[in-house]
Image: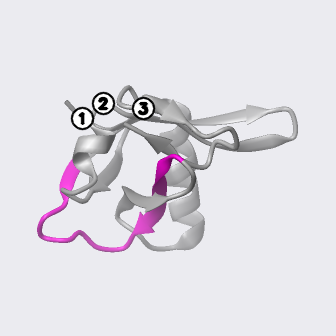
Amino acid sequence: MAVTLSERAASHVANYMVKRGKGIGLRLGVRTSGCSGMAYKLEFADSAQPDDVEFESHGVRVLVDPKSMPYLDGTELDYAREGLNEGFKFNNPNVKDACGCGESFNV
């Protein structure tokens, strides 16, 4: 499978990287956190690590560390605006439960 970006998310990332003036793509991962056990990590990548798993979606590189890959496999990252709020939304088929605040999840 893969980790993908929606067209809106890819456009947002590409525009931000242009403003930022550097970067090769987006790094996605998970960390232990929150009441449900896992939380997403999302940052701009300035370089690839030798063991990164790489995907390309709508012209944007997505890098995932191998330890996070089992938790993220099949995930689509979207960018949504809802009222005054906007941000990334993870559509992850592996999630079995999430906390009420939306900060963490478990598989």
- Residue 35 position in % (x across, y down): 57, 51
Quote the CA–CA distance across marks 3 and 1.
16 Å
Determine the secondary structure under disc 1. Answer: loop
Q: Residue at x 58, y 59 (%)?
A: 16
| Residue placed under numbered mark 3 in the picture | 95
In the rendered structure, which disc, 3 or 2, sits on the residue that comes first in sequence?
A: 2
Q: Is residue 72 left or right of residue 52?
A: right
Q: Quadrant of residue 86?
A: top right
- Residue 85 position in % (x across, y down): 80, 42
Q: Amino acid at mark 3?
A: Val
Residue 27 in view of the camera: no
Circle on res. 79: none
Q: Nearer the viewer, mark 3 or mark 2?
A: 3
Please give the range of residues in magenta: 36-54
Q: Few, some or many C-alpha atoms within 10 Å of disc 2 (few <14, some 14-19, many ≥20)?
A: some
Quote the CA–CA distance across marks 2 and 1.
5 Å
In the rendered structure, which disc, 3 or 1, sits on the residue that comes first in sequence?
A: 1
Q: Few, some or many C-alpha atoms within 10 Å of disc 3 (few <14, some 14-19, many ≥20)?
A: some
Instruction: Count how many numbered circles sit on residues in the image.
Output: 3
- Residue 37 position in % (x across, y down): 46, 51
| Residue placed under numbered mark 1 in the picture | 2
Determine the secondary structure under disc 3. Answer: loop
Q: Amino acid at mark 2?
A: Gly
Quote the CA–CA distance across marks 3 and 2.
11 Å
| Residue placed under numbered mark 2 in the picture | 74
Q: Amino acid at mark 1?
A: Ala
